[in-house]
């Protein structure tokens, strides 16, 4: 049996809400709050969770967003204030897992669910709304502590305190950190690797091919 590689510190969900931002109304579900007990991870969501615009958020490859408590601790030092789980819109706040080291396509057991590493989370302007500071998006990007999305491969229950177990790692090891760096640095070699990786979604492969061509 595989030894646990970490644990779920908190499960966080939220529904879309309308907020006022610089003179306009924006619909967003980035406000996530910890929930007690255990919830079902199934399909493209956790029970009680939703996204405001599934053209760019949510869906199969973005069903569950995870962020590390160690990265929250780092941000607390940077910002000088406490941050509760879910502040950055994460569904699972994890402890003991280096999210940059996750391998694309890697399968993990979380509680009784099986999750598959799909892609990094790249911040949009709604993170700035959540933090009350439009410039925070650039600050978040510069730190490269993005967290990772997962696909729900097998439905199951997840809750705070559940162990995380790595079940399988693909031989073609392409990490979330390598993906983030290739994108943020506009690195043609990294982008070409991303474009050719069979476990990366077709939309991202297409984007990476175009970006690699421009970078060359």
Image: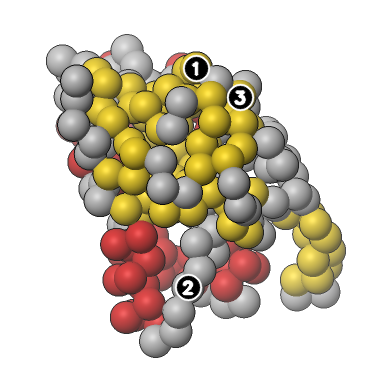
Please indicate whether residue 74 sits to the left or right of residue 8 in the image.
left
Of callouts 1 and 2, which one flags the residue occurring earlier in the amino acid sequence? 2
**Labelled pair 2, 3 in contact (Cβ < 8 Å):** no
Marks 1 and 3 sit apart, C-alpha to C-alpha, by 7 Å
Query: Residue visible at 48% across and 18% down?
Result: 153
Q: CA distance from mark 1 to mark 2?
A: 31 Å
Dot 1, how many residues are within 10 Å of its Cα: few (below 14), some (14-19), or many (20+)? Answer: some
Q: Determine the secondary structure under disc 2.
A: loop
> With 20 as the anchor, is 191 left or right in this view?
left
Asked whether 28 or 82 is in front, the reply is: 82
Res. 180 image quadrant: top left
Judge the density around disc 3: few (<14), some (14-19), many (≥20) Cα neighbours within 10 Å: some
Q: Which residue is mark 2?
A: 83
What residue is rendered at 25% in x and 51% in y? Answer: 96
Rendered location of residue 206, percent (x, y): 44, 22
Measured Cα–Cα span from mark 2 to mark 3: 28 Å
Residue 193 in view, yes or no = no
- The quarter in which the C terminus is drawn is top left
Image coordinates of residue 148 in percent, x first then y, are 39, 42
Query: Residue at image x 23%, y 39%?
Result: 5
Image coords of residue 185 (percent x, y): 26, 49
Name above or below for residue 95 compared with residue 113: below
Q: Is residue 14 above or below residue 45?
A: below
Q: Name the residue that disc number 1 marks.
A: 154
Dot 3: element: strand
- Spot occupied by residue 24 in the image (x, y as percentages of width and height): 83, 67
Asked if the residue under mark 3 is in contact with the one under mark 1, i.e. CB atoms within 8 Å, the reply is no
Please name the residue that numbered disc 3 is placed on.
42
Specify whether residue 97 is in view. yes
């Amino acid at each position: 049996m595989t030894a646990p590689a970490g644990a779920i510190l908190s499960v966080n969900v939220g529904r879309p809400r309308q907020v006022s931002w610089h003179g306009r109304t924006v619909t967003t579900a980035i406000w996530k709050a910890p929930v007690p007990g255990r919830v079902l991870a199934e399909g493209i969501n956790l029970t009680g969770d939703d996204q405001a615009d599934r053209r760019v958020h949510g869906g199969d490859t973005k069903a569950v967003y995870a962020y590390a408590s160690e990265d929250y601790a780092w941000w607390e030092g940077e910002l000088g204030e406490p941050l509760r789980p879910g502040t950055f819109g994460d569904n699972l706040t994890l402890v003991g897992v280096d999210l940059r080291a996750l391998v694309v396509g890697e399968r993990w057991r979380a509680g009784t669910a099986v999750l598959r590493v799909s892609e990094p989370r790249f911040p949009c302007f709604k993170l700035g709304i959540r933090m009350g500071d439009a410039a925070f998006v650039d600050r978040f990007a510069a730190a490269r502590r993005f967290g990772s999305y997962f696909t729900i491969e097998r439905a199951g229950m997840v809750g705070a305190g559940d162990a995380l177990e790595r079940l399988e790692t693909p031989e073609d090891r392409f990490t979330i950190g390598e993906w983030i760096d290739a994108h943020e640095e506009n690195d043609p070699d990294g982008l070409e690797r991303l474009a050719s990786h069979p476990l990366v979604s077709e939309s991202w492969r297409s984007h990476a091919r175009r970006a690699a061509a421009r970078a060359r």
